[in-house]
Image (cartoon, grey):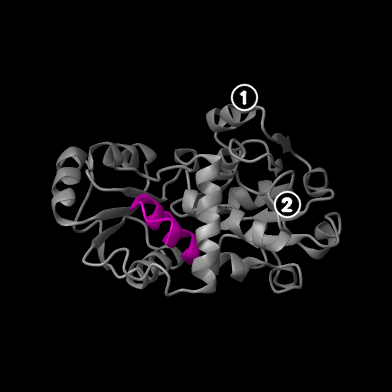
Amino acid sequence: MKRDFLAITDFTTEEIQEVFSLAGRLKENPSKGSGVLKSTTVACIFHKPSLRTRISFETGIHQLGGNSLYVTEKEIQLGVRESIYDAAKVLSRYVGMIVIRTFEQRDVDQLGKHAEVPVINGLTDLLHPCQVMGDMFTVLEKKGRLQDMRIAYLGDGNNVCNSWLNACTRFPLDLRIGTAQGTEPNPEILERARRTGLSKIEICYEPEAAIADADVVYTDVWASMGQKDLAQERAKLLSSFQVNSKLLSKATPDCIVMHCLPANRGEEITDEVMDGPHSAVFDQAENRLHVQKAIMMTLFGRSNT
């Protein structure tokens, strides 16, 4: 049966744990799974430019023995030049898997519904599931567990924040979202995560309250791609949530600092923190590669490799 990975909630807790176990093996020995995608072409549809998502997926596809085909909005405009249904059916005749990075979550959902091959959400304005899968793997790697980790997410309640809320439905986390009035995460995703009752979730409008005794301190840009017109307004709203040495001193002494990149150094995070001893930023970026390979192998039914 064809499966997709469009949101973290598409996998059970046990399946996510298996992905992390496989990612660990792949990180230790990158040659594992080298033939899983043999003779398979993966269409990488990118309506938004990317460094980490594109390079990590294309590298992973090649390491698994497949071929990647980079497709931009010049070649395919879902629902514009042709219907998503038609595009999904045509792509399914040519390729063995689709990775898509675009704007609307509903477009990704429709592509997954109609495609006959696995579809992976590489990012939408609403969700960034592959990023947070890599993030959770990094926390597990650095801290040894996910259960009851106190995570302070500081800044804009964006797609990464929404995906952390989805993660709260799979693992018992203590997630404190430090943000300003008007920049909170998606209310439906927040309510759904709270309704499961698995995790402790709190919205904090004071940065010190959010970061107090945190094991993990996470931040992201204040204005996401396509929102640069909001940059000045967001900077005024969120300036007190900058992750700097003074604020970081409120977290636990052995906390780790995370940022999904790209970073605006000197805005949401200082150089001193990003390059400091608490930073897991570049390990986190690397782990995208290993986790995404594990996700692709899982969708191909080859997670036992």
Nearer to us in this view, 35 or 81: 35
Would residue 72 appear left or right of 220 to someone viewing this image?
A: left
- For mark 2, what is the residue? 241
- Image point 65% across, 62% down: which residue? 141
**34 w.r.t. 92: above or below:** below
Q: Is residue 74 visible?
A: yes
Tag 2: amino acid: Phe
Q: Position of residue 71 (x, y in %)?
A: 24, 61
Q: Position of residue 55 (x, y in %)?
A: 40, 69
Nearer to us in this view, 238 or 66: 66
- For mark 1, what is the residue? 195
The stretch in magenta equals 288-305
Tag 1: amino acid: Arg
Marks 2 and 1, Cα distance to the nearest angstrom? 27 Å
Image quarter (top left, top right, bottom left or bottom right) of the N terminus: top left
Q: Position of residue 232 (x, y in %)?
A: 59, 53
Q: Earlier in the sequence, mark 2 or mark 1?
A: 1
Residue 247: in magenta span: no
**29 w.r.t. 135: above or below:** below
- Magenta stretch prevailing secondary structure: helix
Q: Secondary structure at mark 2?
A: helix
